[in-house]
Image (cartoon, helix red, strand yellow):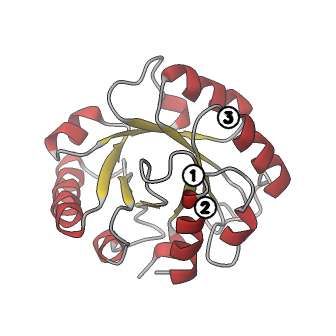
Amino acid sequence: MDQKLATAARRLNARHPMAGLLPPLVLLTDRARLPDPLAAAERLPAGSLVILRDGDLAPEARLALGLALARLCRRQRLRLMVAGDPRLARRVNAAGVHWPETRLPMRASGFATAAAHGARALARARRAGVAAVLLSPVFPTDSHPGAPCLGLMRFAGLARRAGLPVYALGGVDGRTAPRLAGSGVVGVAAIGALRP
């Protein structure tokens, strides 16, 4: 795990009004870029959040991974959310549901977060009543090589006007996270930078 990223995430979170209520660091599972999510989650600082994605797994495999992550999260004092599947979130006793931008319900129930890639998605997430949003991609990212990113200035403008807490995602690591100071983010989310 990138210790500089964890330190930067704590500093960003400490400056946010929701400090202590929302975690500073978020790990998203991704079989292609993070083959061992359990090892990555085990290295997270207490209080971090893990979002189980991997929606392409067979249901029984995703359930098994969710149960394993739930056990680890309880032991390590981490929070767990499940992407796009409230039923699975209940089965693994997760803290809530993370909604992909294209599947965000009109009104989110319980503790929920959402993905967003621009102003319209941020507005939808705010109307849906989610607790926070993961806005991406901030910087160029290995998961989408060559794809356009928001860039720091546009990202910061969107984050400040979002009307809800924002996490920075996309190309965020120990080198880029300090550049987010002053953007108003509650924390950072990552995949590759949190690889064990």
Disc 1 packing (10 Å; few <14; some 14–19; many ≥20): many
Residue at image coords 48%, 24%: 129
Q: Is residue 138 left or right of residue 101?
A: right
- The answer to whether residue 53 is left or right of residue 10 is left
Q: CA distance from mark 2 to mark 3?
A: 17 Å
Residue identified by numbered label 1: 186
Instruction: Evaluate if marks 2 and 3 touch, with contact meaning CB atoms under 8 Å apart.
Output: no
Query: Do tag 3 and tag 1 residues touch (Cβ < 8 Å)?
Result: no
Task: Identify which amino acid the numbered label 2 is placed on.
Answer: Leu
Q: Which residue is mark 3?
A: 162
| Residue 192 horizontal side relative to residue 149, left or right | left
* Label ID, residue 12: 2
Q: Position of residue 2 (x, y in %)?
A: 52, 81
Q: Quadrant of residue 116?
A: top right
Mark 2 closeness class: few <14, some 14–19, many ≥20 residues within 10 Å = many
Q: Residue at x 35, y 78 (%)?
A: 43
Q: Callout 1, which amino acid?
A: Val
The amino acid marked with disc number 3 is Ala
Instruction: Please tell me whether mark 2 sits on a helix, a strand or a loop.
Output: helix
> Residue at 23% across / 62% down in the picture?
73
Residue 78 occupies which quadrant of the picture?
A: bottom left
